[in-house]
Image: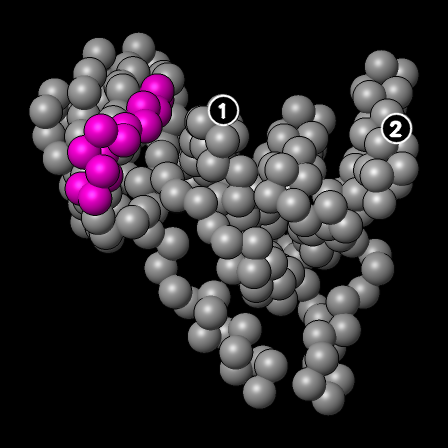
């Protein structure tokens, strides 16, 4: 029953509220939009109304400003600045509940690792924390795929900046699992841990900080920063 419950919850689409309206307020330079699973990108236009299934992509000299308007409260708006060289899925421009985030992270672990199911409980090995084991890719990563993933990773930083911490953590973990070479940047690992912390998943955040601290490539300054975060969470816990 637990397995079925997890699976059902995690296939629910992570859309922004259906009562929200996403408007392109400003466009500068090369900015494209793609609808759903369509392969064709079209030029974004000021005043266009976008849907949760849409994706925005900015070029090297492109940028945009989006405004989310709530139909239930016309006066409530939220602006999102999209800088150059970003791919942003508008389905990620939302807040997940703590339970939904936890379920989705669990399923991400299952997809990226070789876990064992015992009875009705998921037995998670202690070798890794958030990202799971890094399985060998079933096919060589192409330059185009890596470029797309890099732009999507840039999109997670947009989510973090605008306080969409839950979807930032989930999207970053997914990208890092599929493209391990993008999971080595200290700043991005810290971003994931801080997103988990700000999503009130303190245990997961602490484990991620500890995993970062175990890296042998940290500078003394980075090691000190991570240790401060670990000590604070342990004290507060």
223 or 132: nearer the viewer: 223
Of 64 and 79, nearer the camera is: 79
The residue located at (25%, 46%) in the rendering is 52
Callout 2 secondary element: helix
How far apart marks 1 and 2 lie (CA) works out to 23 Å
Depicted 5 relative to depicted 106: above or below: below
Q: Is residue 223 shown above or below 70?
A: above
- Residue 55 location, x and y as percent? 27, 39
Q: Position of residue 193 (x, y in %)?
A: 69, 38
Number of marks drawn: 2
Q: Which residues are magenta?
A: 69-82
Does residue 185 appear in the picture of this structure? Answer: no
Q: Residue at x 64, y 55 (%)?
A: 136
Quarter containing the C terminus: top right
Q: Which one is in front, 30 or 90?
A: 90
The residue that label 1 is drawn on is: 161
Q: Residue 171 magenta-drawn?
A: no
Query: Label 2, on which residue?
Result: 227
Mark yes or no: residue 12 visible: yes
Residue at point 39% right, 43% down? 94
Q: Decide: few, some or many residues near mark 1? Use Cα within 10 Å; few <14, some 14-19, many ≥20.
A: some
């Amino acid at each position: 029953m637990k397995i079925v419950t997890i699976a059902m919850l995690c296939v629910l689409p992570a859309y922004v509220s259906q009562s929200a309206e996403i408007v392109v307020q400003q466009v500068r330079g090369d900015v494209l939009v793609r609808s759903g699973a369509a392969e064709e990108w079209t030029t974004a236009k000021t005043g266009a109304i976008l849907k949760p299934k849409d994706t925005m992509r900015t070029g090297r000299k492109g940028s945009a400003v989006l405004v989310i308007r709530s139909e239930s409260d016309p006066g409530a708006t939220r602006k999102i600045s999209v800088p150059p060289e970003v791919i942003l899925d508008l389905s990620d421009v939302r807040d997940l509940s703590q339970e939904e985030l936890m379920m989705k992270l669990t399923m991400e672990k299952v997809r990226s690792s070789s876990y064992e199911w015992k009875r009705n409980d998921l037995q998670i090995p202690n070798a890794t924390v958030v990202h799971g084991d890094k399985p060998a890719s079933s096919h060589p990563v192409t330059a185009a795929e890596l470029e797309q993933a890099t732009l999507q990773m840039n999109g997670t930083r947009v989510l973090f900046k605008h306080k969409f911490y839950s979807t930032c953590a989930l999207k970053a973990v997914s990208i890092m699992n599929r493209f391990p070479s993008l999971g080595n940047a200290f700043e991005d690992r810290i971003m994931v841990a801080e997103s988990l912390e700000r999503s009130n998943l303190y245990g997961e955040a602490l484990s991620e900080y500890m995993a970062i601290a175990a890296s042998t490539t940290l500078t003394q300054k980075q090691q000190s920063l991570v240790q401060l975060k670990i000590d604070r969470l342990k004290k507060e816990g």
